[in-house]
Amino acid sequence: MSKAANSEARPLQKMFLAVPPSYDFLNRLLTLRMDEYWRRRAARLIVKGNPSKVLDLCTGTGDLALHIRKRSGRQTEVLALDYSAPMLDIAKEKASKKRIKDVQFIQGDAAEMPFEDGSLDAIGIAFAFRNLTFKNPDRDRFLAEILRVLSPGGRFVAVETSQPTNAVMRFVFRAYMRLITKPIGGLLSGHRGAYHYLAHSAINYYQAPELKQILLTAGFSEVNYQHLLGGVAALWECRK
């Protein structure tokens, strides 16, 4: 299937082809920089055990890939894949400015990754797993593809928004998404649709036990998670 055809089939891809210059700034602002702390935690989990070959899936502007590179040994090959060429351009520029080398940025489709079966020891994804799984008709295809390219016993690590278990915390989280993230993100970025989607998908995303069952049903042999900041986000560790 051509990239053009994929874009027609998956409207979210069009959204991420138009990258506002304020993308990284807004991520830091709207999460009070917690997103960077959570990415570092995910990176430490991804490189545990000194994997030989690691992928940052849906790398976006490359933050998780760069954290992985900083924390991994030289023997670890670090790959970063995204559909959006503009996102990858920003990621490459960021790596150059930080003098971080040996990250291979690849333009590709998460549903048809250009890797051999069982060729990756670990895969990480930061705040993009929701895009692959929230009311996405291709969800099972994405999960099957992740499992295909993971080696036996390979680790899949995701950090993603979740649903706070405490009712008060959940109310505050959802109000913040509706009243802060959606209007401010849309205004400052000029991409109101993107931040409307972000707020809507975060508010309505799976509770952790639901997502755990989805992952087990997809074929992961082991699925564990820990809530972050009372369940505003969750850090997932899954085994093939």
Image (cartoon, rainbow, N blue to C red):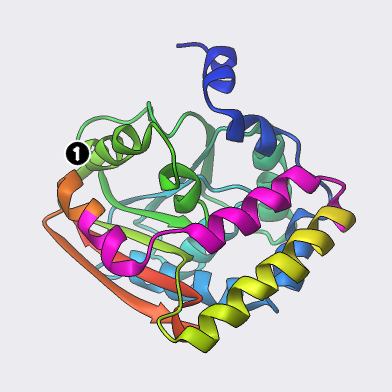
**For mark 1, what is the residue?**
118
Q: Secondary structure at mark 1?
A: loop
Secondary structure mostly taken by the magenta-highlighted segment of the chain? helix
The residue positioned 19% from the left and 45% from the top of the image is 218
Please give the range of residues in magenta: 188-213
Query: Of 111 and 88, which appears nearest the observer?
Result: 111
Residue 149 vertical position relative to residue 223 in the rendered view, above or below: above
Please report the residue visible at 67 percent of the width from the left and 74 percent of the height from the top.
175
Residue 114 percent coordinates (x, y) = 38, 27
Query: Residue at 70% across / 79% down in the picture?
Result: 32
Where, by quadrant of the figure, is residue 19 drawn? top right
The number of callouts visible is 1
Left or right of residue 32, residue 115 in this image: left
Quarter of the N terminus within the rendering: top left
Q: Is residue 25 magenta?
A: no
* Residue at figure coordinates x 67%, y 67% from the top left: 177
Q: Amino acid at mark 1?
A: Gly
Q: Is residue 202 visible?
A: yes
Q: Residues within 10 Å of mark 1 (few under 14, many from 20)?
A: some
**Is residue 195 rendered magenta in the image?**
yes
In the rendered image, the vertical position of residue 209 relative to residue 193, given as above or below:
below
Residue closest to the eye, 66 or 5:
5
Specify whether 196 is left or right of 230: right
From the viewer's perspective, is 141 left or right of 110?
left
173 left or right, relative to 21: left
Residue 150: give x, y in percent of width and height: 23, 44
The answer to which image quadrant residue 146 occupies is top left
Q: Is residue 154 visible?
A: no
Compared with 172, 187 (above or below) is above
